[in-house]
Amino acid sequence: MKSITFLAIFMAISSYYTALSTTIPWYMKDVPHMNHKWYKANCTTIRYRQYARTFIKQAYYLTVTQKSTDIALEKIDAELEVISDKFVNKQNRAIQKIKEKYDLDDDHFGKHLEAINMINKLNIFMLKQDTVDPRRHDENLPQAVKEITCTLLKKNGINPLNVKLLALDEKEIDLGLQGQAILAMNTTKENPFSHTIKLTRNYVNEYHALSNCAHEVEHLLQQHMMTDLFVTEYLQKHRNISSENLETCTAYKKLKKSQEQQAEIFAALRDPDVAYAMTKERRDYEYPGYLYEKHYYYLTTIHMLWTLRSYIASVQTHGTFKATKEHLNTLMERLIS
Ligand SMILES: [Zn+2]
């Protein structure tokens, strides 16, 4: 009897710490990944396990909130930061692997990469300025999609007139493309790189539209296409590696994967509504070759943290738990829908 009690206490304590930990929990390890047939079922399992985790986290944060709402909010922000760092490091590690695989000179490659990062910052700076070359958006693009994308761009300080919004053509839609953030060299001196976001016209629902637009806007904000272009051109020039050959390189695939992850994780970290839309979208659809169950786990974790954050912020505004009960109910409904 004693040993059963001990085991129960041990299980309770370990579940408690697992739920609060920022590392990936044990219950994700038995979910088979990258299995198209079981994707939806696996996501349902993850979802229910995440609900259980939410209640433990909620109980923990309510105790902290009773002492200080500021500390509770800081702790949640720190958790979100840990996720952000994780995905920044993933891209850096992938670049490091490419460097090792092709035995690239530390100094030479490093200096060029630094220069590209500077150009990326400059590009974003330019995209924030008043337009010198206004882009006319594609008339075939649904008004709602245009509005969502322009709002997301504006939220991040980007002037939508500096980005061309295009509708994907039928061929691209048939290939299964949902969107693309592309960069082309422009002939004008004032605006050497022309930024274009291509979006699909066939949206299933508002979550689908918001998550897709946010995904492409994030690619633009991270200037992923510049990093990709740099790596491809550098290896072509210094190692004579064609882009076709590069497509089969594991380290390069990791780089592409890390960029797809960033496009969703960073967008979800910026905006709770985007986090919600992405969890809704990814619960049913994986991104073949790139995003699977583990990715869904991270999106639901971000959504859960945003929900808890919103509740604590509401307690801070209203001063009592009682006044925010209704707010909590709405949030919980959203969390489990
Ligand atoms: Zn993408």
Image: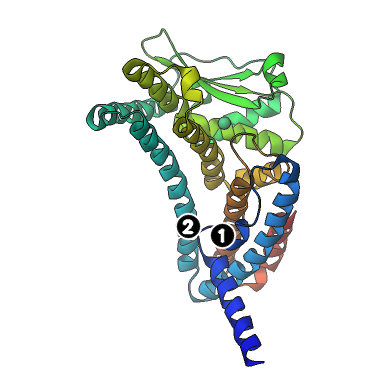
> Which residue occupies 49% across, 76% down?
67
What label sits on residue 207 in the rendered view? Answer: none
62 to 234, vertically: above or below: below
The residue nearer to you, when weighing 151 against 50, is 50
Task: Give left or right: position of 1 versus 25.
Answer: right
Residue 201 shows up from this direction: yes
Q: Give coordinates of residue 266: x percent, y percent.
A: 51, 42
Local SS, label 1: helix
> Residue 179, image x and y in percent?
62, 26
In the rendered structure, the answer to whether residue 271 lies left or right of residue 55 reads left
In the rendered image, which residue does mark 2 sit on? 77
**Residue at 38% from the left image edge and 36% from the top image edge:** 97
- Pick out the residue farthest to the left: 107
Q: Is mark 2 within 8 Å of ligand 1?
A: no
Residue at (50% x, 18% y) in the render: 244
Mark 2 element type: helix
| Distance from the alpha carbon under mark 2 to that under mark 1 | 8 Å
User: Dividing the picture into quarters, in which one does residue 35 lie?
Assistant: top right
Ligand 1 falls in quadrant: top right
Quadrant occupied by the N terminus: bottom right
The structure residue drawn at horizontal position 63% and vertical position 92%, both measured from the top left corner, is 2
Marks 1 and 2: in contact by CB < 8 Å? yes
- Name the residue type under label 1: Arg
Amino acid type of the residue tagged 2 in the rendering:
Asp
Q: Earlier in the sequence, mark 2 or mark 1?
A: 2
The picture places residue 150, in percent across and down from the top left corner, at 58, 29
Q: Position of residue 84 (x, y in %)?
A: 46, 48
**Residue denoted by label 1:** 309
